[in-house]
Each structure stands twice: as C-alpha cells, then as structure tokens.
Image: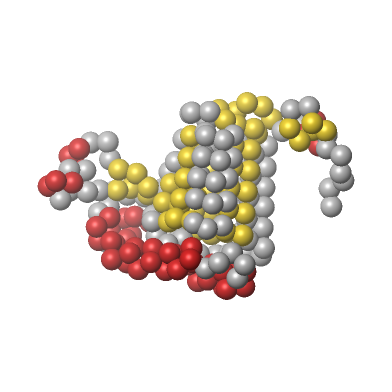
Amino acid sequence: MNHSERRKKGLIYNPTEFYLEQCKLRDKLSEYNRIPCIEVEKRMAMLKELFAEVGHRCLIESPVYSSWGCKNIHLGNGVYCNQGVTFLDDNDIFIGDGVLIGPNTVISTAGHTISTKYRDAPKGIVHNFALPVTIGNNVWIGANVTILPGVTVGDNSVIGAGSVVSKDIPANSVVRGNPCRVVREISERDDEYYYKNHTIDIDAE
C-alpha cells in the first residue's frame, strides 16, 4: 500500500512524499486570495477549480488557507466561510448546506503520532495520520473554533466561539468550551430570541 492510499485510509503515512504536490496546490490557492472581492465571477470560477465540490451560492472570504489547496474539501450549497479560516485537508472534509464558518477557525483532518519514535524530524522521521471531518447541514461555527480529526458535527448545531471540538457533536445542539460540551438543545424559544433576551422582530423569508 502506497502512502497516498494509507493517507486516505486514515493510516500512518509519510507526508514528505506529497510536499511538491501540496506546494503547487497552495500556490494556486494564493492566487485566489489575491483576487479582489469585487470580482465575484472570477472568484467563483476559481473556487470550482480549487475545491473537490462547490455547491450554489458559496462565499469563501480571503484569505483562506489549506494544506492541500482545498483539493479535498466538499462544499454543499450556501456555505459561507469568513476570513482567515484554515483547512488541514489531508483527508476529506465534507461541509453540508447552509454552513456558516466564523473567522480564524481551524478544521483539521491531520495529526501526528504521540510517540517520538515516529515523529523524530531531526532524524528525518515524520509520520502523519488524517481522518475525515464531516459537518452537517445548517451548522454555525463561531470564531476561532478548532475542529479535530475524525469529528462529525450534526445538523443545525451551533459551536460557540473559541471551542475545541474533539468528539462528535449531536444534531440540534448548542455546544461550547474546551473540550467542547453540549450546553443545551435548540428549542422553539430560539425562533423567538436571537441573542439572550433580544427578540426576533422580522419574519423568515
């Protein structure tokens, strides 16, 4: 089994095998980051070149960073990604419809072994692993959130700013903290109040 197959299967692999390929993909992503925001059509066309899949009405603000130039990221419809988001997409990242991603968030599929036997860089020994991340539909991820390898986030959930998500998140939950924990379930009250005791005074379109 080669290192590419090992990476996709979530097994330990040698990342140095892919360095030149990653450099080319990152350079292309840098081109996207330099396109002015006002050039919407040009940016959208390049998103379709960069990402594995891009749905309708996606907006990815610059700068966006990725270890594989977004090659392994699958976007649903209506995904919004704020500035400074980092994707460590050594394995697949699946993002559902209507997902909102706050600034400076990190979504990582990649990690290293704890044992220094397999990560002794001075000796040229570097091993990674990469596990897919799945984010369901209509998830809101606050600013500065970190989502770790292998995590699945259920539909409609809200992840509070600054959280570190190391375990699966159930659907319809408000979660926050380090490590991230369920605070409460989303309820009918959330149809009346948008923040603490601030009432919603418009109808959903």
The residue at the point 52 percent across, 58 percent down is: 62
The residue at the point 46 percent across, 50 percent down is: 86
Q: Is residue 17 left or right of residue 10?
A: left
**Residue 1 visible to the viewer:** no
| Viewer-closest of 115 and 202 | 202
The quadrant in which residue 16 appears is bottom left
- Up the image or down, 115 lies above or below 95; here it is above
Q: Is residue 35 left or right of residue 128?
A: right
| Viewer-closest of 112 and 131 | 112
Q: Position of residue 46 (x, y in %)?
A: 53, 71
Q: Quadrant of the N terminus?
A: bottom left
Q: Position of residue 101 (x, y in %)?
A: 58, 48
| Viewer-closest of 27 and 54 | 27
Q: Is residue 182 left or right of residue 88?
A: right
**Residue 164 visible to the viewer:** yes
Total marks in image:
0
Q: Position of residue 22 (x, y in %)?
A: 34, 63
